[in-house]
Image: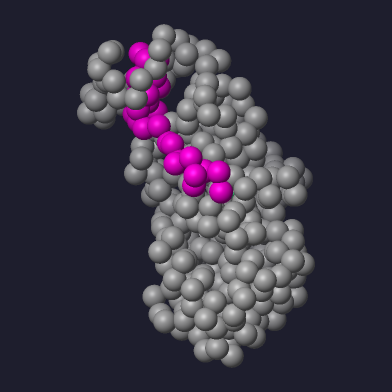
Amino acid sequence: MSYTSNSTANPVQEFKSFASLSDEQAGARIIEARARLGQRVVLLAHHYQRESVYRYADLTGDSLKLARLAARTDAEFILFCGVHFMAEVADILSRPEQTVILPDLAAGCSMADMADLEKVERCWGELTNALGTIEARITPVTYINSAADLKAFCGERGGIVCTSTNAPAIIDWALSRREKVLFFPDQHLGRWTGYKKGIPLDQMAVWDPNLENGGLTAKEIEHARILLWKGHCSVHQMFQVEHIRQWRVQYPDGFVISHPECNLDVCRESDHVGSTEFILETVTAAPPDTRWLVGTELNLVSRLAEQLKAQGKIIKFMAPTMCMCSTMQRIDPQHLAWALENLANGNIVNPIRVPAREAEQARTALTRMLETF
Ligand code: 13P
Ligand code: SF4
């Protein structure tokens, strides 16, 4: 069967006919369409995906693992259950004849949206005015949670991509080449990583993209070793150090594990800090009957709690209010069934295609990361 993007050869089924399906009905259609597609499709899912989607995944992971999986799969179609920047990475790292599909294009990342090319280019220009020969002095480092054009920006300027797993090694790499780092878009991952490296807080200045010169004086820019873009993940900002202190009173022998997108105080007070894959592995490998307070997205925490309760493990979400990543939630069984059934009928809906030139430069920054760390 030949495949077309939204072609009329085999009429494209509209999403509206899937919207009213129950999760069970959508699940049956997912299974049926997958069986028709066989090995031609692989389903990759991030750990924050809801259970009713995650259960259909062939492979799961954090951002780094998913990037590596996308780079080595032979499947013709990569159905990506995650957010837009992850699907872009999969497209950049997969072969040209492979197609990446994101079941709902509204599945973005609000943190990634806090930095755009226009603002980063303006920042670079202002830093050039302040520092002179900028490319000899600053390495741009983008968290993987960013649009492809920002990865391309880094690729073109000797910069690199990092993930929550390899940020410490990447910062070492960057600072061994040039004296400063411009880190975007997550100030918290950048600050925690710099802090762990022993960089004093006063040498990690926050760059506010909405202010002239980032709101910094020339002296502050000169003094900084890491310039932290003023971006954050609103899900991880819910977790506060008071939640950890209350937990420690209630369970003095309990453990605390957090994602590095949490604020510095939360990371400092945690027993372990790491990526979603690290959190999953650490809590899973812990002895039975241990208690865990977890500072990351609710779907992951609820799944872990359910899976490990038979081992007597008590696993709690760090914040008192339940809040999921609303963009990860956009991928539901109905959208997955819609994308898969169209694919099985010969129609590609929601392909993710990064423009060739941008993809090439972004690949430079991603490959630097994947080959070095
Ligand atoms: P991980 O790479 O640790 O899975 O993190 C991705 C993310 O978006 C966390 O909010
Ligand atoms: Fe983005 Fe935060 Fe959602 Fe992760 S949890 S995908 S950083 S909005």
Which quadrant would residue 226 be assigned to in this image?
bottom right
Tell me which colouring the rendered structure shows.
Answer: one colour
Which quadrant would residue 367 be assigned to in this image?
top right
What is the quadrant of the N terminus in the image? top left
Q: Is residue 105 above or below residue 32?
A: below
Residue 218 seen in this snapshot: yes
Left or right of 104, for residue 296? right
Q: Magenta part of the protein: which range? A: 334-361
Residue 310 x %, y %: 65, 36
Residue at screen point 54% across, 77% down: 127
Left or right of 241, for residue 328? left
Residue 272 x %, y %: 70, 59
Residue 158 x %, y %: 64, 59
Q: Is residue 313 above or below residue 208?
A: above
Which quadrant would residue 18 be assigned to in this image?
top left
Count of marks overlaid on the render: 0
Residue 187 x %, y %: 55, 68
Magenta span: chief secondary structure: helix
Q: Is residue 105 above or below residue 134?
A: above
Residue 195 seen in this snapshot: no
In the image, is residue 233 part of the stretch drawn in magenta? no
* Closest to the observer, 316 or 372: 372
Residue at screen point 59% across, 45% down: 363
* Closest to the observer, 191 or 152: 152
In the image, is residue 356 part of the stretch drawn in magenta? yes
Residue at screen point 53% across, 52% down: 152
Residue at screen point 62% across, 26% down: 73
